[in-house]
C-alpha cells in the first residue's frame, strides 16, 4: 500500500538558460519573464529562477539571460519556450543552453536608434519630446517592428527596435528621422541580425 506512495520519484530538475541577443533594461526583461512564466506554468515546464544582463564598458546592455529551473526539459518543452519567444522577442544570435547542449535561435533583427543628447541646439532639447518620437516611430513601424527597450547614456539615448527586417524598419522610419529635429545627427546601428 505505501510502496507506491513512497516509491514515487520526484522529477529531475534541469536548468535552462536563455541568452537573448537583446538590449533590454531589467524592467523590460521582467515583463518578458512574467509572460514566459505563464507559458511555463501552463505547460508544467518549470519556473524562472533568475536572470541578468551583460553590460558593455559604457554601461549599455549587450545581452540578457533568463534562467529556468525545469522539471520538463523534453524537446516538446523546449519547443514551447522557443515558440513563445518567436512570437514575442527572438533576436537573431540568441541561444538556449540546457546542460552542454546549445541551441541557437532567432528570427528578429534589431535596430538601435541612437539620438544625440549633447550636440544639438538647446531649443531642440527644449521643444522636442522623446516620447513623441517613440510614439511616432511605433506608429510608422506598424506590424514590422516595435521598440522593446531603451538606454539613457551620457551623450546618447538609444531606442532598441526589434522586428522582421532591419532594412524595412529603417526605410519606414527614415523620413521621420530626417524631419524631426530631435533625430538630427542620430546613429542607426544594426544590433541583431
Image: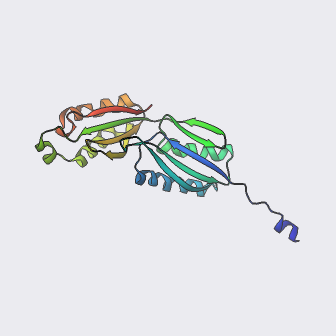
Residue reaching furthest to the left? 123
Where residue 168 sits in the image (x, y, percent)? 36, 30
Where residue 123 sits in the image (x, y, percent)? 10, 44
Residue reaching furthest to the front? 57
Quadrant in which residue 98 is drawn: top right
Toward the viewer: 186 or 164?
186
What coloring was used for the rendering?
rainbow
* Residue at the image position 27 percent from the left and 46 percent from the top: 135
* Residue at the image position 35 percent from the left and 41 percent from the top: 58
Where residue 154 sits in the image (x, y, percent)? 27, 44
Toward the viewer: 70 or 88?
70
Q: Quadrant of the N terminus?
A: bottom right
* Residue at the image position 25 percent from the left and 49 percent from the top: 131
- Is 21 positioned to the left or the right of 9 in the image? left
Quadrant in which residue 41 is drawn: bottom right
* Residue at the image position 47 percent from the left and 37 percent from the top: 91
- Is 117 positioned to the left or the right of 43 in the image? left
Where residue 108 sits in the image (x, y, percent)? 46, 36
Residue 143 seen in the figure: no
Toward the viewer: 14 or 72?
14
Circle count: 0
Q: Quadrant of the C terminus?
A: top left
- Is 70 positioned to the left or the right of 192 in the image? right
Residue reaching furthest to the bottom? 1
Residue 6 seen in the figure: yes
Amino acid at each position: 500500500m505505501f510502496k507506491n506512495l513512497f516509491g514515487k520519484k520526484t522529477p529531475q530538475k534541469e536548468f535552462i538558460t536563455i541568452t537573448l541577443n537583446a538590449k533590454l533594461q531589467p524592467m523590460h526583461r521582467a515583463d518578458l519573464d512574467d509572460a514566459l512564466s505563464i507559458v511555463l506554468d501552463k505547460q508544467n515546464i518549470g519556473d524562472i529562477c533568475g536572470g541578468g544582463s551583460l553590460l558593455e564598458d559604457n554601461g549599455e546592455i549587450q545581452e540578457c539571460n533568463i534562467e529556468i529551473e525545469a522539471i520538463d526539459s523534453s524537446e516538446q518543452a523546449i519547443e514551447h519556450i522557443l515558440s513563445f519567444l518567436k512570437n514575442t522577442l527572438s533576436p537573431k544570435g540568441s541561444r538556449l543552453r540546457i546542460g552542454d547542449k546549445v541551441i541557437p535561435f532567432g528570427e528578429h533583427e534589431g535596430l538601435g536608434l541612437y539620438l544625440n543628447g549633447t550636440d544639438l541646439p538647446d531649443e531642440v532639447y527644449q521643444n522636442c519630446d522623446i516620447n513623441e518620437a517613440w510614439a511616432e516611430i511605433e506608429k510608422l513601424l506598424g506590424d514590422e517592428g516595435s521598440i522593446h527597450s531603451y538606454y539613457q547614456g551620457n551623450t546618447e539615448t538609444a531606442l532598441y527596435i526589434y522586428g522582421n527586417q532591419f532594412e524595412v524598419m529603417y526605410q519606414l522610419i527614415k523620413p521621420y528621422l530626417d524631419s524631426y529635429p530631435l533625430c538630427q545627427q542620430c546613429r542607426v546601428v544594426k544590433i541583431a541580425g
